[in-house]
Image (cartoon, grey):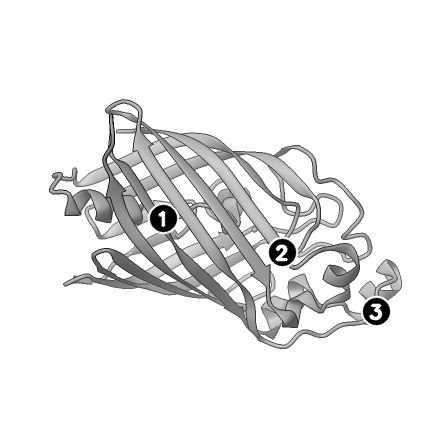
């Protein structure tokens, strides 16, 4: 995962699960939803310095979620999109997202407040921020949700990235407010422009970094599991938790950058407080 998605999407990297989970679960419980739903807040996120890093950072992360009915959405995970088809559990439409620049000296944690600074990216140069145009497809049939997302960079590295998630979505009611939760597997694919922007090593980078050259093919780049939970503290204030474990696939994990300066195992976790209007 420039400030817009630093404040708008891959700021959370692969961390925040979509607000759509909560909307779907609430609707199933028979709670009438407002046409416009807006939530603003912030949280603390522990995540790798960059994708494949050994070192972790603590980040202060803004959290903005906007939705109109089940049509328009803008949130920190899924970007800005509109469902041109919304029928019998299916939603699909265009989406705009943005990916963080990656800086040689700072990784991609522009909102870092502690930890993470090292020389792992020394000699690799910067990867520019990338604006993506693409589309999404969702299918929800209680209690499962399928989400597919395909986008093409139109600035920056101009690569193609595809992401998929399957989630079990439900609500647990104990003493107090209901707890909405979701968990399931996720995968990510990328073409050569994407994989080499982050894990490839050109001859010039090899000279500067001391790492051997590496050219990555396109294909599966990562797979893992994610979990999300949210509950209300008051009528307006909610708290949510996220946890992700991801493993980089061999075609990028075999990069000397990861083999000698990083690790294929990546974990992310955080807690967020939101105020709903």
Q: Quadrant of residue 237?
A: top left
Q: Which mark is residue 18?
A: 1
Q: Please name which of the two marks, 2 or 3, marks the residue nearer to the observer.
A: 2
- Helix, strand or loop at mark 3: loop
Q: Position of residue 43 (x, y in %)?
A: 48, 32
Q: Position of residue 192 (x, y in %)?
A: 61, 74
Q: Nearer the viewer, residue 224 or 78?
A: 224
112 versus 202 height, above or below: above
Residue labelled with disc 2: 265
31 versus 99 height, above or below: above
Residue at 50%, 51% in the rendered image: 14
Q: Nearer the viewer, residue 68 or 22?
A: 22
Q: Quadrant of residue 193?
A: bottom right
Residue at 39%, 56% in the rendered image: 184
Residue 72 is left or right of residue 152, and the answer is left
Residue at 39%, 35% in the rendered image: 240
As measured in the structure, the alpha-carbon distance from the residue carrying label 3 to the one carrying label 1 is 39 Å
Residue labelled with disc 3: 212
* Residue 96 in view here: yes
């Amino acid at each position: 995962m420039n400030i817009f998605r630093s404040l708008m999407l891959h700021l959370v990297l692969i961390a925040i699960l979509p607000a759509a989970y909560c909307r779907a679960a609430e609707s199933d419980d028979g709670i009438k939803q407002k046409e416009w739903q807006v939530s603003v807040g912030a949280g603390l996120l522990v995540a790798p310095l960059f994708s494949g890093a050994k070192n972790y950072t603590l980040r202060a992360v803004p959290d903005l979620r906007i939705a109109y009915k089940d049509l328009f959405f803008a949130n920190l995970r899924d970007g800005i999109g509109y469902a041109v088809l919304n029928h019998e559990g299916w939603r699909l439409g265009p989406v705009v997202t943005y990916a963080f620049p990656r800086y040689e000296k700072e990784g991609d944690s522009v909102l870092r407040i502690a930890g993470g600074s090292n020389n792992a990216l020394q000699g690799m140069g910067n990867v520019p921020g990338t604006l993506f145009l693409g589309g999404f497809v969702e299918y929800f049939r209680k209690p499962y949700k399928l989400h597919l997302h395909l986008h093409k960079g139109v600035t920056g590295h101009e690569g193609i990235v595809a992401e998929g998630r399957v989630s079990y979505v439900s609500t647990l009611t104990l003493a107090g407010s209901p707890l909405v939760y979701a968990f399931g597997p996720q995968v990510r694919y990328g073409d050569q422009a994407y994989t080499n922007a982050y894990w490839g090593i050109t001859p010039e980078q090899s000279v500067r970094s001391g790492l051997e050259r590496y050219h990555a093919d396109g294909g599966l780049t990562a797979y893992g599991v994610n979990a999300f939970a949210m509950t209300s503290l008051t009528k307006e204030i909610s708290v949510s938790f996220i946890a992700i474990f991801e493993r980089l696939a061999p075609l990028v994990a075999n990069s000397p950058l990861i083999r000698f300066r990083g690790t294929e195992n990546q974990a992310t976790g955080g807690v967020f407080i939101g105020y709903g209007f």
